[in-house]
Amino acid sequence: MSNNDNNLPQVTLDRVIEAMRTFDIELTPVEGRYDAATANLNGLPCLFALLDSVLIVRCDVPTDAVYTQADAGLFLAANQINSVSFGARAVITEHENNLVVRSERDVPIAAGMNDEQLATAIQGAVDGVIGAQDAMVSAAEEMAKLGSDSAKQAGESTE
């Protein structure tokens, strides 16, 4: 015997867009797609992509660092971010030979969600993704400083 009173509504892109409106944020559906929308949040380009079982909230920030000439700083910064809980993960990827800092969080949606659950989950995902991007900036600056200090010390020891 099953109880259908507990069935939660399916998460759709329209519901995601409506949930973001509760935060006074307007998502723009990706043209020609029924499963993705974008928004600029705190100056960062964010993508909301709906798959069968998850909603992906992603922020890709391009850098001017060339992939083939990149030092390890950004990769180490991403590792540092992923070693603590920021509510999102950070990776370094490449697009057209330039490094891209990506932060991303998956929200499980396969069982459905009511409006309150969806809004809360999206808020947590957005906060995590933006927080991870902010943390990446700080961690990358720290890694660059450590690298500069190490190079300076190495130069002093060879004199």
Image (spheres, rainbow, N blue to C red):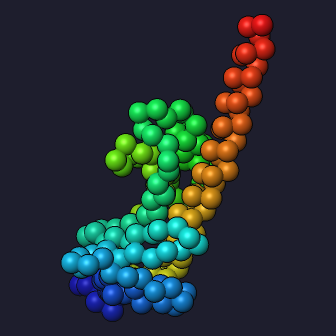
The answer to whether 7 is drawn above or below residue 158 in the figure is below
- Residue 82: % across, % down: 55, 47
- Residue 7: % across, % down: 32, 86
The answer to whether 36 is drawn above or below residue 90 in the figure is below
Left/right placement of residue 45 relative to residue 156 reads left
* The quarter of the displayed image where residue 123 is located: bottom right
Q: Nearer the viewer, residue 93 or 115?
A: 93
Point out the image quarter for the N terminus: bottom left
Find the residue positioned furthest to the top.
Answer: 159
Left/right placement of residue 153 relative to residue 44 reads right
Q: Is residue 116 in sight in this rendering?
A: no
- Residue 120: % across, % down: 52, 79
Q: Nearer the viewer, residue 74 or 79?
A: 74
- The structure residue drawn at horizontal position 40% and vertical position 75%, both measured from the top left corner, is 38
Left/right placement of residue 41 relative to residue 144 reads left
* The quarter of the displayed image where residue 67 is located: top left
- The structure residue drawn at horizontal position 49% and vertical position 35%, both measured from the top left corner, is 70
The answer to whether 141 is drawn above or below residue 89 in the figure is above
- The structure residue drawn at horizontal position 46% and vertical position 86%, both measured from the top left corner, is 26
Q: Nearer the viewer, residue 134 or 152?
A: 152
